[in-house]
Each structure stands twice: as structure tokens, then as C-alpha cells.
Amino acid sequence: MPSHDPLLQPFRLKHVTLRNRVVSTSHEPAYAEDGMPKDRYRLYHHEKAVGGVGLTMIGGSAVVSPDSPPAFGNLLLYRDEIVPWLRRLADDVHEAGAAVMCQVTHLGRRTSNFTGDWLPLVHPSPLREPAHRSVPKVAEAWDLDRIVADYASAAQRCRDAGLDGIELQSYGHLFDAFHSPATNRDQDPFGGGFEERTAFPRRVVQAVRAAVGPDFVVGLRMSMDEDSADGLGREEALRALGLYVGDGVDFLSVIRGSIGSDATLARVIPSMGTPSAPFLDFAGEIRRATSVPVMHASRISDVATARHAIREGLLDLVGMTRPQMADPHLVAKVAAGEEDRIRPCVGANYCLDAIYRSGEATCIHNAATGREQTLLHVQPAAPRRRRAVVVGAGPAGLEAARVLGERGHQVVLLEAADHPGGQVRLASASVRRRDLIGIVDWRVSEAKHHGVDLRCGTWADVATVLAEEPDVVVVATGGLPDPTFGGEGEHLVLDTWDVMSGAVHPQGRVLVYDDHGAEPALDATELLAARGALVELVTPERMLAPDVGSMNSPAYLRAFAEHDVTLTLARRLVGVRREGGGLVARLGSGYTDLVVERHVDHVVVEHGTLPNDELYHELVPLSSNRGAVDHPALLGVRPQPVAPDAAGTFQLFRIGDAVTSRNIHAAVYDALRLCSAV
């Protein structure tokens, strides 16, 4: 029976019929090898096709020229050897029922002069881009001639590989640098009026259309309002779009804003703590004003909003890109009537920040995304049913229980607190980061769906664990705050858990000392400042919170600016003493012998956690493996070996912060790759 769900209706895009209205829009997960979309890249997109997506778009910012060197793992479309790799990817995606297209671009100044072939970057103006900090060369006529030809050749390679179409990128790169008055000024060689500024982009569209022929789909992902005083506005953008459509563009993917700085990029790709679908109505206005099909993706994180966008005619195709990183089977679950089982995108933007932190995109709470070569998104039944006890219901323990339950094991999950969640519950106490609780809620729901016996308010000791007669014990008891700083007066300080849990409410002058570099100190600082405290955030690092990336730092920096938080770099807390009715914090430095003092009412220290591992060590001598982990088996996602002469009756493992202080993704990854093989 045909579905009446607007999201599941087919859509014809030129000669391509999409099976539904859901798209994974162009983005770059940085899974390429040697600039090629090899097996890891292919399997990442194939999983979405298996999961029901109508169109998956690859090659976020796939580059057309050597003087557009990769900035974040971009595909190299100027190499002929990419064609067979693209063809294999396209064949697999098509076999699974989805269409596939590739974004095509020249990065212009949005990369580095000091990478790749070290060719000078080109741009219509000699303006340094803040994010990548390179000063470009002003393009010459011969530069534009060769780049137009490179666009055409890249498009041909995509067509020859069997892709269904391409998308030209027009926000923050070379294409739009010409038509935007913010980056192509009157005095520039190719600047001037509207006709002069659109001349190069029109040449690109015309050359691409001539190269691929009339039937191949050519789209444009374009900022239809740069939202800046000197940038491209809505009316001029629509005028330019009309020209590009006349030159051969078949569809539009709507962007609003610009990406030249961390602050503006974070507005274009909104994180948690921002309104849902902030540009959806704007995209609807653009759709009513243009003649080509329109798609859009910007924090459309839930199915209800996506369905509304299609039902109300705001969009023809709806982009749910980050949501399908969280759950590549999102569309299949909608079609199966299991919408409530979709793993939610919590908007953490960890996926984007991870590219610069670790060189690859990773979802904060789906560790299988991007690892499809070794990890499954749906767990098969285990060869035999075993009794498993998981201790601790933070993200690691919940994931372990969920996976073990999905594999058919009999699972008991013991949690000392009255509610599951562990440190995620603390982090979600921040109003702006409250969506993190979705990491917990989804796992609790899935664990119960798979028959896990979740017992909160249960203190687990050795006797409690042994009473369950387990075959496997997974200790996920997390960590406890480590407020040490290596100086006198450690007994006088608070930790960030005290603040975030509401156990204390520091007022007056508060010094927050961050020797961890991740979100907890920033969360505590934001909370304290919002409550009226006068906060100084001190770090021994040369930059603020080095583990918090460019997608998440703008929200903190905005809050700190609004509340006049003092930021102090390269200072180390060396001592705290009482004086009068307050405290004196002594701050040293690794760069000088000078010690300065701060007179404050409270000192809050963030230094990560120490493992809460007492139960684990008590269980070690009773276990068959003495807690040992076979690393080759773990990395290969194979069962942990069982010693034939082992005296213990159960295997014992610990995961997450019960091992050492890390983050949510590490905790989930620990649990998934261990328990997938149990």
C-alpha cells in the first residue's frame, strides 16, 4: 500500500526519480584516502542508502584544481583515478535504491597556502580568510580560464562515474567570492557592477553544462542572503540565481549566512541550544520565488519538522544530514512505523569539530558511523545467550546494555543513582546543552525494548554482582572529579560537578581553573556567570579550551562576552589560601617566575576525572580473564578469548571513564566494539 507520508513520496529531479524526499546533503566526513572515496567512504554512504535515504550527496567541497588543496579531507576531482572509485560507490548506492550526487568546488582562499602542492591560493581580492589564515593571490585572467576548464573536467568525471548529478558550491568558496560584493570589491580586477561580479560564476555553470550535456543534473548550493551589511542580499541573490538557472542549473540547495569566521559558520550550521530549523521559513520564501526545485538542511533534526517542511510546500527535498550520521536508518524506521526508535541527533556538532580534532567525522553517540568496515549499525543475534551484568548507567554502561540486549543476551544494568545518565546528566544541566539528555533517553528506551533489566538506586558490590551468576561483567562506573592542581589548599576548592549538580551555588568573585581543556569548565563558567557571579576563567594553555572546536566555542564565547567573563591564558593555579572572609588564589606560569594573586570568594577546579574503579579491582581476582583485554580481538571486533583453564566463572571488562578520563564518544565506542562481539 502506498504511503501517504509526505516524506516518503517520490520526487522527480530532471531524469532522476528519488524514492522519497529525504536527502543527506553534501558534507565532507574526511574519510577519503589519498583524495579518493575508497571503501570507508563508500560504505558510509552505502549505509544511508540501505537505511532508506532518497539521495545521498558525497564530496562536500570536492575540489577541481591543485591550487584548491584539501582543507578537511576533500576529494580530488582533478585526478582521473577518482572515476573508478566514484563508479563503485555509485553502483553500490544505486543497488540499495538511492541516488547519489557530488558537490564540486574550488575552495579559493578557504584552505591553506602551506599544504598540498604549496600553490598560491586565488581569490578576486587579497583578503585573508579568518578561519584558515591564508592571504590569497588576486586571480588573473589565465587563472580563471584554467579553473573554468577544471570545473568542466571534474563534472565530466562525475558523469562518467555514473553519478546522478553534481552540485556547485556557492558559499564561502571561489564561485561566490566573485558575485558577493563583500569579497569582490569595486576596485578589484573582476569587481564592479552585478554583471561583472557574476561573469565568472556564469562561465563556470555554462562550461559545466556544456561538458555534461543536457540530461545530467546540475545543482547549486548557494547562500541566498549572506546576512551581512556588505554581503550578497536576498534580492541580488535571486537575480543571480535566475541567471544561473538560465545557464543550466536544475535545483537549488538554500543556505543563509556566510562561513568566513567561526561565529558566522556556527550560525549557518547551528548547534544545540539554538532554535530548530532557523532558516526553514526563509528557504520557503526562496522556493516561492524561484522556478527550480529547492532543498535545504540546517538543524532540521526531527522527523516532524522535516515532514512539516514538505507538507507545507516550504521545500521539495529536505536535508537531514547530521540526523543520518546519528542514525543512517532514519528513513527506514519512518517507513516501518518505528519513528520513536530513531537515534536522535542531539546537535552537539561533535561530528564537525572532530574533523579538526582527530582528522575524521565521528558522531558523538553513534560510534559505528564512519566505521562501517568493522562495526554494524544493527546487531545480529549472538550464537548463544549469556547472562551479563553491567554496572553503571552512564553513556558507556547504557550502550553496553543496549548492545548486549540487542544481541539477545540476558542483561541486568545496575545504577547507584536514582536516574541513569552519569556525567551526561550533569552536562545537560546547562540549558543550552540540555539536548544531550537524548543520548541517555534513547539508550534507556532501546535497552528496555531489548529486555534489559535496569535497576536504578542499586549500589553494586561484589555480592550483588555475583548473585546474578553472570557470564560477563562490564564495569562502567565512570569517574569521579579530580580537583587536584598540585599546590597547597586543594581542600579549599570546589569542582565543576559541585556547580553543575546544584550542590553549591557560588556567588561573588569566582575563579574557574581549567586544566582539562574540554566543555566542563566552560559549562560551569557559563552557568556561574549567568547567575550573576563575577567569573575569571584561567587556563595554563596558550588557548582557551583546546578540546572544544570551532563549531561549539562561539556559543561559549558569546555568553562570556555578554556576562563580561575575564579570560586568562598561560596561568597555572599553584596555591589557594584563606584570607579574611575569602580566598587568595596564586597563579604561576610556565613562561615566567612571576606569581600573581587573585582575591576571590570561590575557586572551582576542572581537572577531568579519576576512575571510580574500586568494584572492578575487587572483581579482578574472581574473573576468568583477570580483567585483561585482548587488543587484537577488540580492534577486530572479535570475541574476547576464554582461557581453557580459567578458574573464574565470568569474564570481566571495564569501559568508559572507569578506565580513564575521556569523553562521551570514547565511552560509547568502548562499549560498542567490545559488546558487539560478546
Image (tube, rainbow, N blue to C red):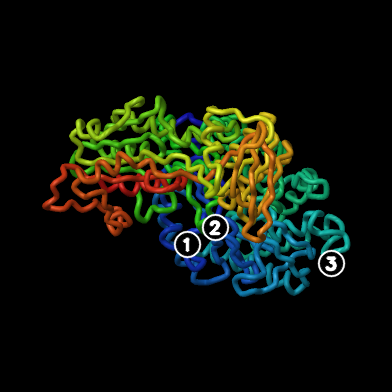
Residue beneath disc 2: 59
> Which residue is identified by label 1?
37
Question: Please, what is the three-letter code of the amino acid marked with disc 3?
Answer: Pro
Q: Residues within 10 Å of mark 2 (few under 14, many from 20)?
A: many
Residue 54: x percent and y percent? 49, 44
Q: Label 1 is placed on what type of residue?
A: Pro
From where the camera sits, is residue 116 visible? Answer: yes
Q: Secondary structure at mark 2?
A: strand
Residue bearing the label numbered 3 = 189
Q: Is residue 293 visible?
A: no
Looking at the rendered structure, the secondary structure element under dot 3 is: loop
State the CA–CA distance, disc 1 to disc 3.
37 Å
Dividing the image into 4 quarters, which one contains the C terminus?
Answer: top left
Counting from the top left corner in percent of width and height, residue 462 is at: 24, 35
Between residue 592 and residue 318, name the one nearer to us. Answer: 592
Residue at (59% x, 31% y) in the render: 431
Q: Earlier in the sequence, mark 1 or mark 3?
A: 1
